[in-house]
Amino acid sequence: MNAVDQVLANLDDVNSWQEELYVALHQNPELSMQESETAEEIARRLESFGYEVQRIGGGVVGRLRNGEGPTVLFRADIDALPVAEASGLPYASTKTMVDRDGVTQPVMHACGHDHHITAGLGAAALLAQSQDAWAGTYIALFQPGEETAEGARSMVKDGLVEKVGPIDVALGQHVLTSPAAGQVATHSGPTLSAAASLRIHIVGKGSHGSMPHLGIDPVLMAASIVVRLQGIVAREINPNDFAVVTVGSIKSGTKANVIPGDATMLLNIRAYSEDIKAKLIDSITRIARAECEASGAPEAPTIEVFDEYPLTDNDAGATSKVTAAFTSHFGEDRVQPLGRVTASEDFSVIPDAFGVPYSYWGFGGFTPDQVALPNHNPGFAPAMQPTLRTGTEAAVTAILAFLGKGN
């Protein structure tokens, strides 16, 4: 029996408590950087498995030492979203929380992080139960604040690298609408896009709607900026490269016959290159300033960049090793090409801080009889099984590609 089969021999027993845990997590989601109860449950379970547990930067890190060998880190994210659930699941979340701005929000695991936690804990339990199948050190890391791009940086800032010590490789995964449930998917190189959000505040001059000549209209400035932004991807980015500029919000004014004094725009950008991401920010800044100046605005716009996500650029060697292990365990028909995904992640902040290679893959969450709604949708409801089982198997298989005896 190989190392993977040996460790997964207890999977049915682990699955029995995983389903109960998954329901509890789904019904009790917590917003980004406020995941106190979730972190407490994770720490308690890791300790019961025999792990050395540390709280770092809002996250939880468990270490299991098992003789000489490499050190492998596997990361799972733990936060939920301010979304009102409309999945129709019998265990749907009805929870609300007061966010960090003091606003009461509905909360939902609309991105599948409850699957990630449950699979991560399942893998941790299985590895602890079968230590004769592998050698080295396993680091189970549960990260807060992925949805706001804060959590990985928070853990690094709180001394993650120094507190954990050297590692050799970092791994992570995400439940997705594609591939199908029961399948996994990998990709080498740029995989998840680099991203950032921007807030542009435009100052005009208020006036009566019937007297536009006495004002400076920020709504017109915002509209002009939106139109001009469309030229960035169309005319400034090489057609062979990928880039997205989205204006998600414009807020200005209160009445039809009042020209307001200001406007606020929210933008989001995506790219598969940090250089292109930087170019997008520079171009947006140039256009916003130029349009305001052209309109005679009394001051330059204020431009804030926030929620920055790095590029997820999977290491070729690590990904090849993971893909080979998946193919050996699942069979070729259950291992699919992931390709480039336009969503973004802060996972790579962690391996970059350690200076090690990493691989991040997807696993399917929707069965053929389901409507595969996208992540962040209020109806997002991956099938409990085989999703939990597949996510757990994938985590164990990838970890043992580096720690399994005989590799």
Image (tube, rainbow, N blue to C red):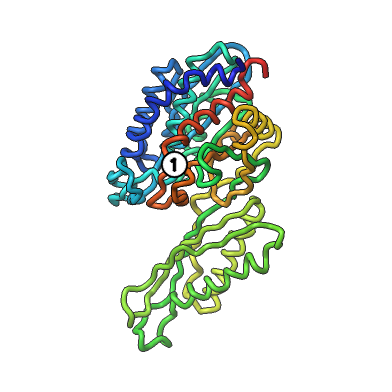
Which residue is outermost to the front? Answer: 369
Spot occupied by residue 141 in the image (x, y as percentages of width and height): 49, 29
Q: Is residue 163 left or right of residue 250?
A: right
Q: Is residue 356 visible?
A: no
Q: Residue at x 65, y 68 (%)?
A: 234
The quarter of the image holding the N terminus is: top right
Q: Residue at x 53, y 18 (%)?
A: 7
The quarter of the image holding the C terminus is: top right
Spot occupied by residue 96 in the image (x, y as percentages of width and height): 28, 46
Q: Is residue 265 left or right of residue 211?
A: right
Spot occupied by residue 78 in the image (x, y as percentages of width and height): 42, 37
Which residue in the protein does label 1 denote?
112
Q: Secondary structure at mark 1?
A: loop
Q: Residues within 10 Å of mark 1 (few under 14, many from 20)?
A: many
Q: Quadrant of residue 183?
A: top right
Q: Quadrant of residue 324?
A: top right
Give the amino acid type for the residue marked by disc 1 in the picture: Gly
